Image: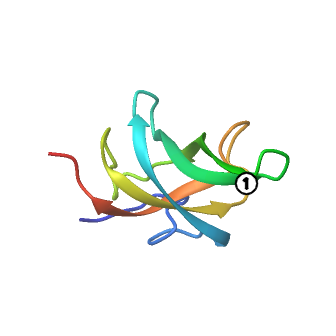
Amino acid sequence: MDCNDVKCPVHGHLKTHGNEVEGLVVSDKARKTVIIEHGYTTFLTKYERSLRKTSRIAAYNPDCIKAKKGDLVVIAGSRRLSKTKSFVVTKVMKRAE
């Protein structure tokens, strides 16, 4: 497949930096954008307990990757692409059935 997207991290000129986050795509309604839900734990020292939290991250979805709702994806930090997007989908770990 021929990808001529400038913002694609694989075929284009977009550089990624920082850590990579693995998460589940919960929404793909917007054009070239997916919402990833990332679960993590944090420790509360006052109560000496762990707390499960989730964060929702908007990420750029290139045409050559085409992540859909239910996919398990890896996203990486990049420069600010829009008001809410500063992450880009780099690969799909597992496709939804």
**Relative depth, front residue between 55 and 48:** 48
Tag count:
1
**Relative depth, front residue between 46 and 68:** 46
Q: Which residue is mark 1?
A: 43
Residue 87 falls in image quadrant = bottom right
Local crowd at mark 1 within 10 Å, few (<14), some, or many (≥20)?
few
Check disc 1 and report its element: helix, strand or loop.
Answer: strand
Residue farthest to the right, as pictured: 46
Identified at 46% across, 58% down, the residue is: 5
**Relative depth, front residue between 20 and 28:** 20
Q: Is residue 8 above or below residue 95?
A: below
Q: Residue 38's x, y, as percent?
A: 53, 48
Identified at 35% across, 54% down, the residue is: 72
Relative to 4, 41 lies left or right: right
The colour scheme used here is rainbow
What kind of residue is marked 1?
A: Phe
Identified at 21% across, 47% down, the residue is: 96
